[in-house]
């Protein structure tokens, strides 16, 4: 296996640890959690004293790495290319995984993607080559699995332009999902700021056995904390249960921490990580980590009395943990397996299971595949024919190659499974699902992490559930959502009743991992001569124009483009699926702006009233008309607005179309930052009930924007159609620097001026 991780960088990080941890302990005056150690070891200015006690403040950090996936890298690198820098300041990689559609199977699908998205892949390859960025070509694997296998290291700090960057927490990192503009800062050699997080401790005792797996830990945690419960927090898992789990199992838990809104999750360095590092060809990294192992774990006093050190503590006994199935439509609706069948009946969800899908960045480790294959083998042995369609998405070429060599993929094939490309595919709506009738309510179950409405196949009638790969496999064999493999029997092809035995798997391949072509391309030493082509008439790529600076005036007479009702995720604001096509072309992708959001005033998606002529029309066209007419507008939203993806398009598109502010009950972290970065106003109702005061025909005046200052609420006057007026307060979390971004029309305008100046 080629060695592409940066050993010198890791050595440099580790050499800072002993003194940084000692200084932090002194500043804080008590034992430290692992999270705190990693954060203090990565302070931009190294000054523990000044960082300590900054409470809810933003603090500057120096991440070690940047990872980007194809669908977000385009915008990140288009922004980077305007800064004037010659090379990235920290090791960075691009991974081509989102733009591959699942249709018939790996080989054909990959070829189709290469044909269809050649322009974008070539752009990413050449721009990576130019700026010193490692390039993982289409088919190499899903970003988070590749990062775990190649780059993640205990105690490191990484940012990535994808919300599931947090996956690397399974290998003891602080790995955080961000928008492309944040990545651009770090690649430009600037500090990266994050609000000092709250700490949630999850103590794991006992040991997983039988049908329960690591996925069930996070499915249960999601049920406890909900999609908002982790907001602003880093979740630290510890205890004997954590140590008894595989490293990739920890990765699964950290991965799906994105679904509870957590900033990230992490685990202390232990033997499972050591085994995984060695198993993936990184014996040197394991040796380096061993040398400072005490710093790559929380202090023993912390784990002995967690309530004293964490803001919240949850305890889970793995020995009692029941498998869970979460859904539909939201990842936090958690059902223990024994209660699920009744829930399906009570809620009238379609019990017939049409497709079971395993794999993805969440669950495609060797352990996951062998455990699921053990069930597939039983199906063959016990003469059961899988009743549902069944697909497998390997996370990387390394895992796929090894699983093929070891006969695992062959076993799935015997059960009727279809192996898809090593890519996101159905997880991100890149799925040409064949269905007889899209209007029929139907059910699917996946081992992925998200199940928002219409996410996987673009069909709002699809009820998507999330579970472990082994539960997905068992249910696909049964073809029935109400089947409980722990207790129920199935009738085989000979009419005999049979029962599935517990799944069995292997943590790591006994013969080691292998791969012929991992799909990596190192960048040129000197990329200055590399030419990056963006055709002026391209419909997929567009060079960026700087956004205009604020005019220094209060906004007056703003109309309400849309008042979004209920869940409004980044999928609602900037849909994926077929729209992924335009991720490098801001103007074209803006045609999907908020088309998935439900209009509070008529309960419909993509139908809003134009204040120009009173007609109803699609959101993007209505907004384009406001922009052309010079009418300012705002977007109003509900709780946890912008939940889900890191895609900054959800912030850049409204900005590009001329929306001035987004006013909501609460924000998801990444989206709020993305809005700020792009020079938008991200505001929250001081009084949530004021959401109800916003009327369809309001004209809104900002009366004190000219005095915009940290910690000071803003005042809005709502001029209702009947002539009455109401004044409301809105809050914001902008610090002084972020207010400068707003004034300059976006953070990039400032970086550009600095790099050129
Ligand atoms: C997702 O899981 O929603 C994605 C697709 O990976 C996104 C990134 C994107 O929108 O490109 C994410 O989670 O950040
Ligand atoms: Fe890809 Fe799905 Fe993972 Fe996002 S969650 S990176 S779309 S596999």
Image (spheres, grey):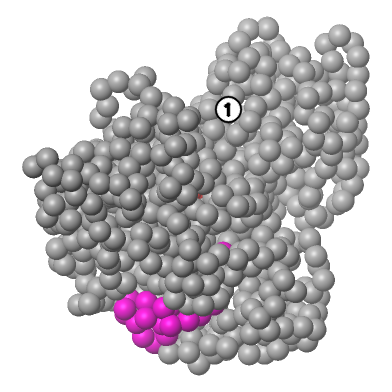
Which residue lies most toward the bottom here? Answer: 291
Is residue 270 magenta-colored? yes
Q: Nearer the viewer, residue 165 or 561?
A: 165
Mark 1 lies on residue: 597
Q: Nearer the viewer, residue 739 or 567?
A: 567
Viewed as shown, does residue 34 lie left or right of 208? right
The magenta-colored residue range is 265-286
Q: Position of residue 219 (x, y in %)?
A: 49, 53
**Does any portion of residue 123 appear in the rendered image?**
no
Q: Position of residue 444 (x, y in %)?
A: 35, 37
Please tell me in which quadrant of the rendered image residue 375 appears.
bottom left
Point out the image quarter for the C terminus.
bottom right
Determine whether 587 is above or below 67 in the image. above
Is residue 215 magenta-colored? no
Q: Nearer the viewer, residue 222 or 746?
A: 222
Please tell me in which quadrant of the rendered image residue 654 appears.
top right
Determine whether 11 is above or below 589 in the image. below
What residue is drawn where x is 89% and y is 11%?
Answer: 723
Badge 1, how many Cα within 10 Å: few under 14, some, many 20+?
A: many
């Amino acid at each position: 296996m080629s060695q592409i991780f940066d050993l010198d960088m890791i050595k440099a990080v580790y050499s800072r640890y002993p003194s940084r941890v000692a200084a932090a302990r002194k500043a804080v005056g008590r034992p430290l959690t692992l999270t705190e150690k990693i954060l203090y070891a990565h302070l931009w200015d190294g000054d523990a004293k000044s960082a300590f006690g900054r409470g809810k403040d933003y603090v500057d950090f120096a991440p070690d790495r940047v990872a980007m996936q194809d669908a977000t890298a385009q915008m990140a690198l288009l922004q980077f290319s305007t800064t004037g820098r010659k090379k990235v300041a920290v090791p960075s990689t691009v991974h081509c995984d989102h733009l591959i559609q699942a249709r018939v199977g790996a080989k054909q699908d990959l070829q189709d993607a290469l044909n269809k998205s050649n322009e974008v892949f070539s752009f990413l390859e050449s721009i990576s080559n130019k700026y010193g960025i490692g390039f993982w070509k289409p088919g190499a694997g899903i970003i988070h699995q590749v990062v775990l296998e190649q780059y993640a290291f205990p105690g490191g700090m990484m940012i990535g332009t994808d919300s599931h960057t947090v996956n690397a927490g399974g290998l003891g990192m602080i790995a955080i999902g961000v928008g492309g503009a944040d990545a651009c800062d770090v690649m430009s050699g600037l500090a990266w700021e994050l609000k000092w997080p709250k700490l949630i401790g999850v103590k794991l005792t006992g040991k997983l056995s039988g049908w329960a797996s690591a996925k069930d830990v996070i499915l249960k945690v999601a049920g406890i904390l909900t999609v908002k419960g982790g907001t602003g927090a880093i979740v630290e898992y510890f205890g004997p249960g954590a140590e008894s789990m595989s490293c990739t199992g920890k990765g699964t838990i950290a991965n799906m921490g994105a679904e509870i809104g957590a900033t990230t999750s992490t685990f202390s360095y232990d033997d499972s990580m050591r085994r995984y590092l060695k198993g993936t060809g990184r014996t040197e990294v394991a040796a380096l980590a061993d040398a400072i192992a005490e710093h790559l774990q929380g202090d023993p006093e912390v784990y002995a009395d967690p309530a004293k050190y964490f803001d919240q503590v949850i305890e889970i006994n793995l020995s009692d943990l029941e498998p869970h199935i979460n859904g539909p439509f939201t990842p936090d609706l958690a059902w223990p397996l024994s209660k699920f069948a009744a829930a399906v009946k009570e809620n009238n969800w379609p019990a017939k299971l049409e497709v079971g899908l395993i794999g993805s960045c969440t669950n495609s480790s060797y352990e996951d595949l062998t455990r699921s294959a053990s069930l597939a083998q039983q199906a063959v042995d016990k003469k059961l024919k899988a009743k549902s369609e069944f697909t497998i998405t390997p996370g990387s070429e390394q895992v796929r190659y090894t699983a093929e060599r070891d006969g695992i993929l062959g076993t799935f094939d015997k059960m009727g499974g279809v192996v898809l490309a090593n890519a996101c595919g159905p997880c991100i709506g890149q799925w040409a699902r064949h269905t007889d009738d899209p209007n029929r309510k139907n059910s699917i179950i996946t081992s992925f992490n998200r199940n928002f409405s219409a996410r996987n196949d673009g069909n709002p009638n699809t009820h998507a559930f999330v579970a472990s790969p082994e539960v997905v496999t068992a249910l696909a064999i049964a073809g029935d959502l109400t089947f409980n493999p722990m207790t129920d029997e199935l009738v085989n092809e000979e009419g005999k009743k049979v029962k599935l035995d517990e799944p069995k798997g292997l943590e790591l391949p006994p013969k080691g991992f292998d791969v012929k072509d991992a799909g990596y391309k190192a960048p040129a030493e000197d990329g200055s001569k590399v030419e990056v082509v963006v055709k002026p008439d391209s419909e997929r790529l567009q060079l960026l124009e700087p956004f205009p600076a604020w005019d220094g005036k209060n906004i007056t007479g703003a109309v309400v483009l849309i008042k979004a009702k209920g869940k409004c995720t980044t999928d609602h604001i900037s849909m994926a699926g077929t729209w992924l096509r335009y991720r490098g072309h801001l103007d074209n992708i803006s045609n999907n702006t908020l088309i998935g959001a439900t209009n509070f005033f008529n309960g419909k998606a993509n139908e809003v009233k134009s204040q120009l002529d009173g007609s109803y029309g699609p959101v993007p066209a209505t907004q384009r008309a406001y922009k052309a007419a010079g009418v300012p507008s705002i977007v109003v939203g509900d709780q946890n607005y912008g939940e889900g993806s890191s895609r900054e398009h959800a912030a850049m598109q409204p900005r590009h179309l001329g929306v001035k502010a987004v006013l909501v009950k609460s924000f998801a972290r990444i989206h709020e930052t993305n809005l700020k970065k792009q020079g938008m106003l991200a505001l929250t109702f001081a009084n949530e009930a004021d959401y109800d005061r916003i009327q369809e025909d309001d004209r809104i005046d900002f009366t004190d924007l000219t005095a915009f200052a940290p910690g000071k609420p803003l005042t809005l006057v709502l001029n209702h159609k009947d002539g009455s007026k109401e004044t409301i307060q809105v809050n914001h979390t902008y610090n002084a620097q972020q207010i400068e971004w707003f004034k300059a029309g976006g953070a990039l305008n400032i970086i550009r001026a600095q790099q050129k100046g």
